[in-house]
Image: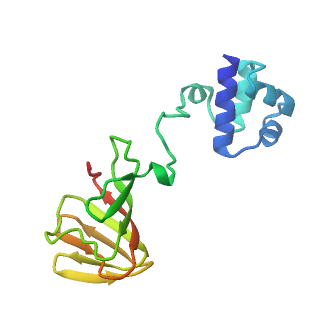
Amino acid sequence: MADDVGVRLRALRTLRGISQRELAKCCGVTHSSLSLIEQGKVSPSVSSLKKILDAIPMSVGDFFTMDLENGRRVFYSTDDLADVGSGDVIYKLVGADRRDRALSFMVETYPPGADTGREMIAHQGEEAGVVLEGEIEITIGADSRLLGPGEAYYFETNVPHRFRNLGEAPCRLVSCATPARAF
């Protein structure tokens, strides 16, 4: 039990960005006592734990019921991003392992000549993005525009749309679409 309290307390303190010394000073518990509690070597009394949590601030009930680790992955390295693209277009999807995603957030790469296809795409939702490198021609309905680095777009995806790289350099952009698409 002391170990669980210590692990939870350290996680909460770290999450709130409070140092051990700072918390000890705020709650009137010695730094060494707080350190021993976090290491699981000492089990605090309820009144001591309440004094510590009051300085954060958090109730004892919330402390024992909070979900510090929801079991969901939060961070992804470049190698963890799933390529869900087709043809020459690369779509690196963030959070592909989340079955209940509410959005599709991607890093897209269009090599020179790449095209999402002669047939324009349409689906329910919204999409937005920003060009990082290169240029991309985006056609939304009857409107077409060539976007370069730093330029952005936002549209309702039920309007037929198409992306083409007419340039001689790859184009990279980041995009977000709702609802999440199953690839």
Query: In x, y percent, where is residue 181?
Result: 26, 52
In-image side of 122 versus 80 (left or right): left
Query: In x, y percent, where is residue 105?
Result: 38, 57
In-image side of 179 versus 36 (left or right): left
The front one of 137 and 123 is 137
Q: Residue at x 15, y 72 (%)?
A: 118
The front one of 98 and 64 is 98
Query: In x, y percent, where is residue 106?
Result: 38, 59
The front one of 174 and 154 is 174
Q: Residue at x 18, y 59 (%)?
A: 123
Q: How is the image coloured?
A: rainbow
Query: In x, y percent, where is residue 70?
Result: 49, 34
Q: Residue at x 78, y 35 (%)?
A: 27
In-image side of 26 versus 59 (left or right): right
Q: Residue at x 73, y 22 (%)?
A: 40
40 versus 155 height, above or below: above
Quadrant showing the N terminus: top right
Residue 151 occupies quadrant? bottom left
Residue 110 occupies quadrant? bottom left
Res. 122 in view: yes
The front one of 106 and 63 is 106
In-image side of 127 versus 36 (left or right): left
36 versus 101 height, above or below: above
Q: Residue furthest top?
A: 1
